[in-house]
């Protein structure tokens, strides 16, 4: 049996990967995927703890996260498509209308 | 019953005002003038009908006051203000004078304002003026009276400043408004005192309740209301607005001086005679203020060069007589003089307007002269007005002025204070001098300007003058003993002659003195100003010409410090302190924003990094705590 710590370690590695991805990549789609990676690393942590504590709450929350992630994908992709249409680019650094 | 028609008297000018104010611009000028004139004519006719019904209803020798409650305006706790009208002998006399003289002035205005592109606005104001004054004289409640009082002030402001593109007219309008406001403030304080002590502002209840007031409250209320009256009736020391009011169209001056405005103060005292004339010391104050104003204005009028300013000062002077009458406990005599003054003063002003019309707005008497020939009818009217105001029998002014002097003399016999009488007599002499001077300089001698080609005014302007000339010549019959004193008998039951002045003055002797003084004045005026000579009277003349420097005194004591204060408030205080504070706050936040905007780089990834750092800090805090 794999110890819970290993799952948590994997979860942490995935989360850091996702975070670094968000911070260093400029392509909006890649950033998006990195965000998904972060979400799923958290899901893994939830499941691990749920299993370890013998409580079902963590598992339930995972479903919520999945649903929210799906919704977020819909909205986010729509935004990216729209940005691409207007600018012919999905480089996140080009979108800087809010610069002060 | 016909008396029930009384509210209609108010309705007609209101309708005329609404018509001219709403659609006047689309009407032809003459139509809007006739709408205005007809609405006043309807008022006058209604007033006549009410008068005849009133005379039938009233039992001989008794006073009759009919209240018309219209609706309850303010009802809160103890405060109960009924909007209502009050019809009695006094208000009927006033309504007839105001609407009758007003009607003639309206008709005259149609001719006078025929060329003015803003005639509809003019007639709208004129109708509103009539409405305000009629509301004032018909009011059954002092608060309603106050509304009329203020509306009259407003209309005078609008009409004096009618040609508001001229700075002089605009500032004259403001001056009238502000000076009136000073009196109005006192008036309002008087109302407060009456209300706190009597718990009502109903005129009939005040008349009945005045006797029950303490001496102090009565005197204070009466003096405050009298201060309001001095503002509206242009008595010392609040007279300064009236001579400047000449900037308005001339018929407006006629209206203000004869019918709709300056008489309000006199009316107020007659309306509340039981309050004013029983208050300790107050009648003496009223008589003295009136006598001094009469004398002061007459002397100033002697050295004025603007014909209309002469007439303006003569109005102050004549109003002074009315206040002398009030102070001599003879309100009926004062009202009699009010009526005759309305006739001859309106006549004089309309004649002056006719001169302006003929001479293309020249009104400086130094540039007039010799107008008797080209302006035959105008000159005739003016001379009748002069004879009336100078007190030459049998013209109207003689009877009313003589009656007032008689009462002032009787008061002197009673109290030993002959000063009002002496000043009144002296004023009568000066009045005859300066009015003769005005007539001589304007109509006599040779024209000062040979190139002017004066032309007589149109019939529409001459007819009202003709009617007024008849009234100014024969109006004395209203109070002449030979004619049975119809006006005095009409007012008698409401305002009985004071009983405490039992001694009767030597009437015939006094009348003889009056006539002699008036004739002497005319003679002096005639000889001194023959061939358009105009003796300057040296330093005294300058003193008179500058109005005893009262305007300059106000300028130095009130206006100049006020301007300095305003400049100080506008400069150091407003710009230096308030604006600086406001701008300083703005600069602080602007600088803050300038610094903060550097955070907004527009790079989403940088935001994400900051988010991460923030999260780590917060979580770290909670973990390591």
Image: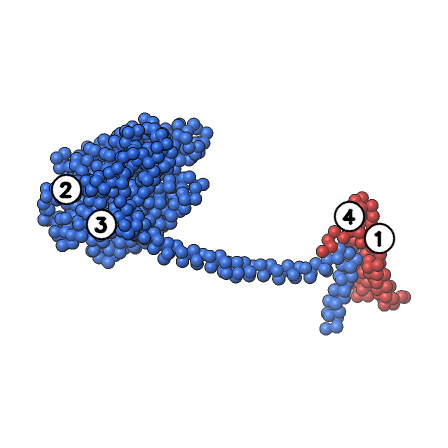
Q: Are marks 3 and 2 on the same chain?
A: yes
Q: Which residue is mark 1?
A: A27
Out of B219 and B139, give the one closest to the viewer.
B219
The colour of chain A is red
Check residue B291 in the rendering and tell me which mark sits there, or answer none: 3
Q: Chain of mark 3?
A: B
Dot 3: few (<14), some (14–19), or many (≥20) neighbours within 10 Å? many
Q: Quadrant of residue B55?
A: top left
- Report helix, strand or loop for mark 2: helix
Q: Which residue is mark 2?
A: B516
Horizontal and vertical percent position of residue B476: 18, 36
Chain letter tied to blue: B
Q: Alpha-carbon distance for marks 2 and 1?
A: 115 Å
Residue at x 41%, y 44% (from the top left corner): B168
Task: Report the mark closest to the observer, 2 or 1.
Answer: 2
Q: Which residue is mark 4?
A: A79
Residue B353 appears in the rendering: no
- Report helix, strand or loop for mark 1: loop
């Amino acid at each position: 049996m794999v110890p819970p710590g290993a799952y948590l370690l994997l979860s942490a590695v995935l989360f850091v990967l996702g975070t670094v991805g968000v911070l260093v990549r400029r392509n909006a789609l890649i950033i998006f995927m990195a965000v998904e990676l972060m979400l799923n690393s958290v899901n893994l942590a939830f499941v691990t703890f749920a299993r370890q504590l013998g409580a079902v709450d963590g598992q339930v929350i995972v479903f919520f996260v999945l649903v929210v992630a799906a919704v977020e994908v819909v909205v986010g992709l729509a935004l990216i498509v729209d940005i691409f249409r207007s600018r012919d680019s999905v480089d996140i650094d080009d979108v800087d209308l809010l610069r002060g | 019953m016909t008396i029930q028609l009384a509210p209609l008297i108010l309705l007609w000018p209101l309708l005329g005002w609404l018509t001219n104010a709403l659609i006047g611009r689309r009407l032809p000028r003459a139509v809007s003038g006739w709408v205005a004139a007809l609405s006043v004519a309807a008022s006058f006719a209604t007033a006549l009908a009410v008068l005849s019904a009133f005379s039938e209803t009233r039992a001989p020798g008794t006073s009759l006051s009919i209240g018309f409650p219209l609706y309850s305006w303010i009802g809160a706790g103890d405060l109960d203000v009924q909007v209502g009208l009050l019809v009695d002998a006094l208000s009927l006399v006033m309504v007839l004078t105001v609407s009758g003289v007003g009607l003639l002035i309206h008709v005259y205005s149609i001719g006078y304002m025929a060329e003015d592109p803003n005639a509809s606005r003019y007639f709208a104001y004129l109708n509103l003026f009539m409405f305000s004054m009629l509301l004032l004289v018909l009011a059954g409640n002092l608060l309603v009276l106050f509304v009329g009082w203020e509306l009259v002030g407003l209309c005078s402001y609008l009409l004096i400043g009618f040609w508001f593109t001229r700075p002089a007219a605009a500032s004259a309008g403001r001056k009238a408004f502000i000076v009136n406001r000073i009196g109005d403030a006192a008036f309002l304080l008087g109302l407060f005192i009456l209300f706190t002590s009597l718990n009502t502002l109903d005129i009939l209840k005040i008349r009945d309740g005045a006797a029950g007031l303490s001496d102090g409250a009565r005197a204070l209320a009466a003096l405050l209301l009298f201060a309001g009256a001095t503002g509206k009736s242009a008595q010392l020391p609040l007279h300064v607005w009236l001579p400047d009011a000449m900037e308005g169209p001339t018929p407006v001056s006629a209206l203000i001086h004869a019918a709709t405005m300056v008489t309000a103060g006199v009316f107020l005292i007659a309306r509340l005679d039981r309050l004013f004339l029983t208050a300790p010391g107050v009648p003496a104050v009223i008589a003295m203020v009136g006598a001094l104003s009469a004398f002061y204005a007459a002397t100033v009028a002697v050295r004025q060069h603007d014909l209309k300013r002469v007439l303006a000062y003569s109005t102050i002077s004549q109003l002074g007589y009315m206040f002398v009458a009030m102070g001599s406990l003879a309100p009926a005599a004062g009202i009699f003089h009010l009526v005759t003054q309305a006739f001859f003063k309106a006549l004089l002003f309309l004649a002056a307007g006719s001169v302006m019309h003929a001479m293309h707005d020249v009104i400086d008497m130094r540039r007039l002269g010799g107008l008797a020939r080209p302006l035959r009818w105008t000159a005739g009217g003016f001379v009748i007005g002069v004879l009336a105001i100078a007190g030459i029998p049998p013209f109207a002014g003689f009877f009313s002025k003589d009656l007032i002097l008689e009462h002032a003399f009787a008061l002197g016999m009673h109290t030993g204070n002959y000063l009002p009488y002496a000043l009144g007599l002296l004023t009568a002499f000066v009045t005859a001098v300066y009015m003769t001077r005005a007539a001589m300089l304007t109509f006599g001698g040779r024209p000062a300007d040979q190139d002017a080609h004066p032309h007589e005014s149109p019939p529409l302007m001459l007819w009202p003058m003709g009617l007024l000339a008849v009234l100014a010549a024969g109006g004395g019959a209203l109070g002449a003993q030979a004619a049975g004193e119809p006006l005095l008998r009409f007012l008698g039951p409401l305002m009985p002659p004071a009983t405490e002045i039992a001694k009767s003055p030597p009437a015939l002797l006094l009348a003889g003195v009056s006539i002699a003084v008036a004739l002497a004045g005319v003679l002096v005026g005639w000889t001194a100003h023959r061939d358009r000579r105009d003796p300057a009277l040296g330093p005294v003349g300058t003193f008179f010409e500058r109005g005893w420097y009262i305007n300059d005194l106000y300028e130095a004591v009130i206006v100049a410090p006020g301007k300095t204060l305003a400049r100080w408030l506008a400069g150091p205080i407003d710009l230096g302190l308030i604006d600086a504070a406001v701008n300083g706050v703005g600069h602080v936040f602007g600088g803050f924003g300038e610094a903060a905007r550097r955070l907004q780089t527009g790079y989403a990834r940088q935001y994400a990094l900051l988010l991460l750092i923030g999260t780590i800090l917060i979580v770290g805090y909670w973990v390591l705590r």
